[in-house]
Image (cartoon, helix red, strand yellow):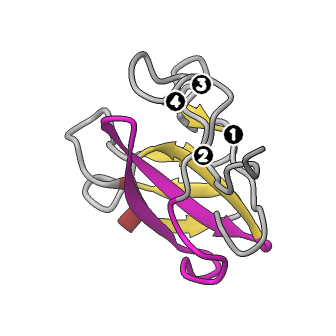
Amino acid sequence: MSEPRPSEITPEATPTGTPAGEFTTVAKVGEIPEGQGAAYPVAGRMVAVFCEGGKYFAIDDFCPHMGASLAGGYVEKGIVACPWHAWRFCIHDGKWCDNPRIKIDAFETRVQGDEV
């Protein structure tokens, strides 16, 4: 009997790659500083993982406006601002703050042991 896979991101919104419900380890707890993000390849795409309040949140890494990495954006109160043109997205659900009907993909996360 194998142990459960430790990990963090399930690509439910990912059309290809890891099946929904499976997780991929991307970091160790503490590697992503509080209030910041980091980008990781998961199932053929880049995912931005943020640490806020000791919890981890994951959204598509690329801003739909011009393709900047959202992981490098400024994070405050659950919102990340794109570092290029300040488009703002909720790190909890991927909604664009200026028009919540538009959103980028958001992913379920989990911490198992010291793995995100």
Q: Are marks 1 and 3 in contact (CB under 8 Å)?
A: yes
**Residue, disc 1:** 108
**Residue, disc 4:** 105
Query: Callout 1, which amino acid?
Result: Glu
**Residue, disc 2:** 9
As rendered, which of 95 and 61 lies closer to the eye? 61
Answer whether residue 73 is visible to the viewer in this image: no
Q: Is residue 106 above or below residue 37?
A: above
N-term-proximal mark, 4 vs 3: 3
**Residue, disc 3:** 12
Q: CA distance from mark 2 to mark 4?
A: 12 Å
Q: Quick one: label 4, few (<14), some, or many (20+) residues within 10 Å?
A: some
Q: Position of residue 99 (x, y in %)?
A: 55, 26
Query: Callout 2, which amino acid?
Result: Ile
Q: Mark 2, mark 4: which one is toward the viewer? A: 2
Q: CA distance from mark 4 to mark 3?
A: 9 Å
N-term-proximal mark, 1 vs 3: 3
Q: Is residue 45 magenta?
A: yes
Q: Is residue 77 above or below residue 67?
A: below
Q: CA distance from mark 3 to mark 2?
A: 9 Å
